[in-house]
Image (tube, helix red, strand yellow):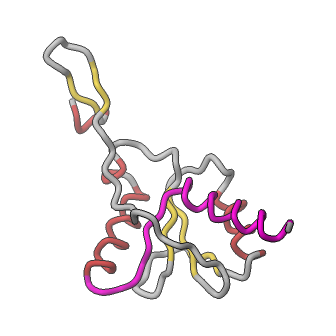
């Protein structure tokens, strides 16, 4: 049952959602100029195309695949608890593999990414 729906039954018979473990960085600094970004999952911010347009406007390059030269993998907030069994789980696994072998890929949440965008907007308006 857990593999099918991403939940498990408690002793009372109620369904409880499993916690979603994501390999996110604790508090990375996000830089935009001349960086590469890959997006995976579904985003509250908007479509992936919208996210990529923002990245381009900030002097970064959006890419479709995770490679060892990637700077940031941004994971959308609307990720499923069973992310490892999804197509976007492949990007996350690839990023972990590259990071574990010495690459400097930074895995960040959409929330952290949007906070960095807000910081840039605040500084631009000063």
Query: Which of 123/15 is in front?
Result: 123
Please state the horizontal and vertical placement of residue 14, each as a whole percent of the image.
25, 15
Q: Residue drawn at (31%, 50%), measured in percent from left and top? A: 21
The image quadrant that residue 124 belongs to is bottom right
Q: Quadrant of the N terminus?
A: top left
Please state the horizontal and vertical placement of residue 29, each as a whole percent of the image.
53, 73
Work out whether 36 lies above or below 45: below
Magenta residue span: 101-125
Work out whether 14 lies above or below 118: above
Please state the horizontal and vertical placement of residue 53, each as a whole percent of the image.
74, 68
Q: Is residue 10 left or right of residue 94?
A: left
Query: Residue reaching furthest right?
Result: 125
Query: Residue reaching furthest left?
Result: 11
Q: Residue drawn at (36%, 85%), measured in percent from left and top? A: 103
Q: Is residue 103 magenta?
A: yes
Please state the horizontal and vertical placement of residue 122, each as a whole percent of the image.
77, 63
Q: Residue drawn at (60%, 83%), measured in percent from left and top? A: 35
Query: Residue reaching furthest front?
Result: 126
Q: Residue drawn at (40%, 63%), measured in percent from left and top? A: 26
Q: Is residue 31 magenta?
A: no
The image quadrant that residue 89 belongs to is bottom left
Q: Quadrant of the C terminus?
A: bottom right
| Predominant secondary structure, magenta span | helix
């Amino acid at each position: 049952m857990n593999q099918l729906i991403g939940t498990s039954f408690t002793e009372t018979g109620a369904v409880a959602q499993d916690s979603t473990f994501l390999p996110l960085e604790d508090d990375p600094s996000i830089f935009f100029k001349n960086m590469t970004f890959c997006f995976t999952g579904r985003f509250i911010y908007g479509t992936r195309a919208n996210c990529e347009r923002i990245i381009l406007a900030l002097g970064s390059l959006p890419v479709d695949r995770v490679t060892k030269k990637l700077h940031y993998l941004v994971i959308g907030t609307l990720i499923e608890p069973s992310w490892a069994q999804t197509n976007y789980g492949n990007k996350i696994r690839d990023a972990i593999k590259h990071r574990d072998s010495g690459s400097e890929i930074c895995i960040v949440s959409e929330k952290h990414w949007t906070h960095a965008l807000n910081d840039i907007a605040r500084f631009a308006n000063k």
